[in-house]
Amino acid sequence: QAQLVESGGGLVQAGGSLRLSCVASGRIRGVNLMGWYRQAPGKQRDLVATFTGDGGTIYSDSVKDRFRISRNRARDTVYLQMNSLKPEDTAVYYCKTMFAGQDYWGRGTQVTVSA
């Protein structure tokens, strides 16, 4: 069964750091395209950072100088290192991948940044 499981969220003060992890299991293991999205209350789900098909990365303008996406292929894990966190980064963070034309999402991990 294909599954993405996020972890690493929590409560942090502004200026702090968190590292999120997302582990893939089942038939989506080894898939290259994995990325992070977030959804704040009352807002749509937006891209935060993702790997592209050619191994590059794309970042949202609001995070590109503060967040870094990385992955460990051997562990089927993608990470999101978040530094200099701001209250506006508060959201549920979701991991996403695509396989055989289908999107797969994790259940999300809550990140709350206090002022």
Image: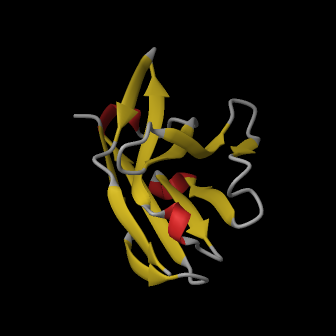
Residue 57 location, quadrant: top right
Please provide percent x and percent y for residue 38. 46, 48
Q: Is residue 69 left or right of residue 73?
A: right
| Residue 88: x %, y % from top left | 54, 63
As displayed, is residue 105 above or below residue 101? below
- In the displayed structure, 83 sits above or below 15; it is above
Look at 70% across and 47% down and name the residue there. 59
Q: Nearer the viewer, residue 88 or 63?
A: 88
Q: Residue furthest left?
A: 1
Question: Would residue 34 be visible to someone looking at this image?
Answer: yes
Regarding residue 7, the answer to whether it shows in the image is: no
In the image: residue 47, left or right of residue 5: right
Q: Give the percent coordinates (x, y) of residue 31.
A: 51, 35
Count of picture labels? 0
Residue at the image point whose x is 61% and y is 83% from the top: 15
| Residue situated furthest top in the rendering | 101
**In the displayed structure, would residue 55 be above or below residue 85?**
above
Q: Nearer the viewer, residue 62 or 8?
A: 62
In the image, what residue occupies the spot 66% across and 63% down?
67
The quadrant in which the N terminus is found is top left
The percent position of residue 106, horizontal first and vertical second, equals: 33, 44
Task: Give left or right: position of 25 versus 33.
Answer: left
